[in-house]
Amino acid sequence: MHLVLFLIFAGLCLAGAINLLLQSHPINSALSLVVVMIALAVLYLLLGAEFLAAAQIIVYSGAIMVLFVFVVMLLNAGREERTLGSKVAKTLGFPAVVAVMGVLATIILHLQGMGAAAINQGLIPTEELSRVLFHELLLPFEITSILILIAILGAVALARQEGSERSVTK
Amino acid sequence: MTLLEFALWNLLKVVVVTVILLLGVAYTVLLERKAVGRIQNRWGPSRVGPFGLLQPLVDGAKNFLKEDLIPAAVYRPIYLLAPIISLGCALVVIAVIPFGANMGPKGFDLFEVSNINIGLLVVLGLTSMGVYGIALAGWSSNNKYSLLGSLRSSAQLISYELALGLSLVGVVLRAGSFNLRTIVDQQAQHGLLSWNMFGGFQFVAFFIYLMAAYAETNRSPFDLPEAESELTGGYHTEYSSMKFAMFFMAEYANMINVGCVATLLFLGGWTSPFGHLIGPFHSAWINALLSIFWFVFKVFMFLFLYIWVRGTLPRFRYDQLMNFGWRFLMPLAILNIVGTSLWLALR
């Protein structure tokens, strides 16, 4: 049952990701990304991380992707122009990606004893994870949040500056 | 209970709950028309059936028989998808709502479609997914009113979702669980006095939740996305026939969902307000029916409040709405979390 569900949603995830690249309209791409996020949430659920799955849906597909769709709507972005793509990407990029993926897959399979591990073996529940995060790693965690806060403030400051210049020139 | 029996029972539960929800939607519309009618000193629907009671069915039939227009300039796939997302997200929420005390054989819950330990998060997640229905409907209609309506609506939903989510944190802190049954059980000891709204000192959270819920369901006084006088109808201007009806049903289903969540989190769910004064009776069935009665009664009161507010309050201006959400509700919700955590820590 787990394997069937995994195959369905992993397939959906990959299909969404490929569709994201192939679509020429930004809103279709954004919606494909939503499908990818939801499929990922289901995969988390299959791994027994319910909280993570719900957070994935609420934060990524519910908040961040809505913002993407919002921006696309606001700018009313049209169809993207198709370029044929650079030759470098085709000759170097694809083989490089395949090579990196191959190395990663081999290492992971090797560590798991060539795929012998069952799907719910050696799982760490979200509770343990958060205990580590909020006890041992509390300081780095808080510093990260301050970093993000600084980034937000920076974005606001940049946007403000541009706005005030525009109002001056007008 | 074998697997097949389990599947059949669950299917039956899903069908019954969905039918009741849809009937509830239809009759909430009638209740609204009647109550708003009385507030405005007129009768409301009174011709079809006794007291106009058959009006919702006739309205449904009318919507089915109307011509389904699809304007030429719409972006078809998304135009067709949007009402489905909207209604789908609204209807699925009811799956995690427990509406009566736990009954039935072990491992099977008669009064809840599925009892899961992240119930509250599922509700929040589905609500946040519902935004897509409205946003995409407005964008794909290729109409300025629709686009403006859906932009307003998305901005409003994103802003108030934060306040809504944060207002629930206090309740979750008190219960220590996302499971809706656990949250209700924790309020069950002393009737009214142990409800989160009174005994739990979560009335600030309840106030924030109430305000955010009006905004989340696009209801008056925050119904700017479909302000008739400015936008002719907002995001569903270009929809007709059953597609319009789907948006309409989604709005009322969302109202019922919000009422259910408020009942579960703040008003003690299916527990009696009198606690053990009117005690548990000997017959398990009477207890079960009584629990369902209290749940439905509380949801009904919540819906009536919705309609009352709609009938009596004027609409906000858009900047007032945004300021209220970000500068008042958000800080208040954060203060509530800090206060609740301190209280729980120092108790």
Image (spheres, rainbow, N blue to C red):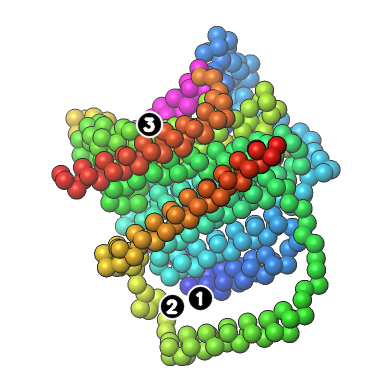
Q: Which mark is residue A129?
A: none
Residue at left offset 54%, top offset 19%: B314
Q: How busy is the neighbourhood of tag 3: few (under 14 within 10 Å), some, or many (20 plus)?
A: some
Q: Which mark is residue A3?
A: 1
Q: How busy is the neighbourhood of tag 1: few (under 14 within 10 Å), some, or many (20 plus)?
A: few
Residue at left offset 69%, top offset 40%: A169
CA gap between label 1 and label 3 equals 45 Å
Q: Secondary structure at mark 2?
A: loop
Q: Tell me which chain the residue with mark 1 is part of.
A: A
Write down the region rendered in magenta. Answer: B290-312
On screen, residue A59 above or below B131: below
Q: CB of mark 2 within 8 Å of CB of mark 1?
A: yes
Q: Is residue A26 magenta?
A: no
Q: Which residue is mark 2?
A: A119
Name the amino acid type tagged 2.
Ile
Q: Which residue is mark 3?
A: B207
Task: Return the residue nearer the eye: B140 or B45.
Answer: B140
Q: Secondary structure at mark 3?
A: helix
